[in-house]
Amino acid sequence: MTTVLRDTPQSIADPIIELIAQGLGKHPAAHLWRKLVAVDLSFYKSFISEEIRDEGRAEGRAQGAVRRAAEDVLDILEVRGIDIPDAVRERVTDCDDLEILRQWHRRAVTAPTAAEIFEDE
């Protein structure tokens, strides 16, 4: 469908894209449809394409915040001269929970060793 719509005039394709999205509702196929139309949004100028772009931006910002939080935890430990074993570094960088990273960040300020930022877990 997306291949056909790519070659369809925008005035015709936009309503079809919207109708398909609305028709799929909350079915699992709706998620797949959103991914398919997200592949190349340059020719989609519709409500759903704008929504997908906004979701992508929000997701990118969230991922960036998590990455920065992990870097901050490691930076504090490094600045304090605390050795950071590979297992600790991996656990911090693999964490995708911003609230947990914030807890580790606070603990990194006073923890005597890198591993102790994980205590109480």
Image: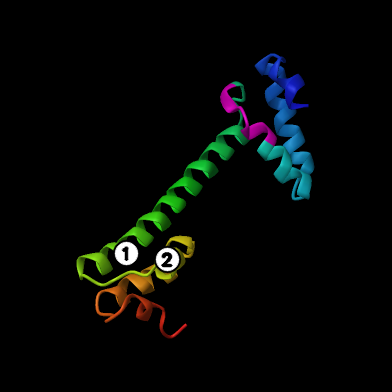
Sooner in the amino-acid sequence: mark 1 or mark 2: 1
Horizontal placement of 13 versus 76: left or right? right
* Residue at 43% over, 48% down: 61
Q: Are marks 1 and 2 in contact (CB under 8 Å)?
A: yes
Please check the rendered image and state whether residue 73 is part of the magenta-colored stretch, yes or no.
Answer: no
- By what rule are the colours in the image chosen? rainbow
- Give me the residue at 62% from left, 34% from top: 38
Q: How many marks on residues? A: 2
Q: Residues within 10 Å of mark 1 (few under 14, many from 20)?
A: many
Residue bearing mark 1: 74
Residue drawn where x is 20% and y is 65% of the image: 79
Relative image position of residue 113 (x, y in whole percent): 30, 79
**Please, what is the three-letter code of the amino acid marked with disc 1?**
Leu
The residue range painted magenta reads 36-42
- Magenta stretch: dominant secondary structure: helix
Quadrant in the picture for the N terminus: top right
Q: Position of residue 57 (x, y in %)?
A: 48, 42
Q: CA distance from mark 1 to mark 2?
A: 8 Å
Residue 69 to residue 99: above or below: above
Question: Quadrant location of residue 83?
Answer: bottom left
Any mark on residue 92, and which? 2
